[in-house]
């Protein structure tokens, strides 16, 4: 969760445990992985419309992924991380942001 100076929530995400079937993993991993590969599901990622375009969602996902990697290293656990934007507008906004970053457009200072 990210809050502004007035303690209003401007960005949040939910996390839950999930599993990915070994058959959908790369061949090198599927040979050594258990049938169900444990993972972390990132869901319900949202940013307040007043803070849209500031890169908060991107920063949230980067923080979650960095934390997941750190926990995996500590636990010597190889897992999967998935992003499940449930709403079409979230998927569209995420894809648009990814296209902007690939096109080399600058984000505001301190963002993504």
Image: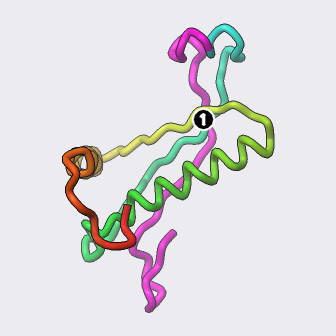
Note whether 69 is above or below 58 in the view shown.
Answer: above
Magenta-colored span = 1-28
Classify residue 31 by image quadrant: top right
Residue at 19% across / 47% down in the picture? Answer: 103
Residue at 37% across / 45% down in the picture? Answer: 85
Comparing 60 with 9, the one in front is 60
Classify residue 52 by image quadrant: bottom left
Q: Specify whether residue 106 is painted magenta.
A: no
Instruction: Point out residue 83 in the picture as x, y percentages from the top left corner.
Output: 44, 41
Could you tell me which quadrant the C terminus lies in? bottom left
Comparing 99 with 33, the one in front is 99
Note whether 2 is above or below 86 in the view shown.
Answer: below
Classify residue 53 by image quadrant: bottom left
Comparing 94 with 87, the one in front is 94
Comparing 111 with 3, the one in front is 111
Side of 34 where 55 appears, left or right: left
């Amino acid at each position: 969760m990210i809050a502004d100076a007035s303690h209003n929530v401007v960005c949040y995400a939910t996390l839950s445990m999930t599993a990915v079937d070994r058959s959908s993993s790369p061949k090198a991993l599927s040979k050594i992985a258990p049938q169900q590969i444990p993972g972390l599901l990132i869901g319900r990622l949202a940013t307040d419309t007043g803070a849209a375009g500031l890169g908060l969602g991107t920063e949230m996902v980067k923080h979650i992924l960095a934390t997941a990697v750190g926990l995996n290293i500590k636990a010597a656990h190889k897992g999967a991380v998935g992003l499940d934007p449930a709403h079409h507008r979230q998927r569209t906004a995420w894809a648009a942001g990814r296209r902007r970053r690939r096109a080399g457009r600058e984000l505001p200072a301190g963002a993504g």
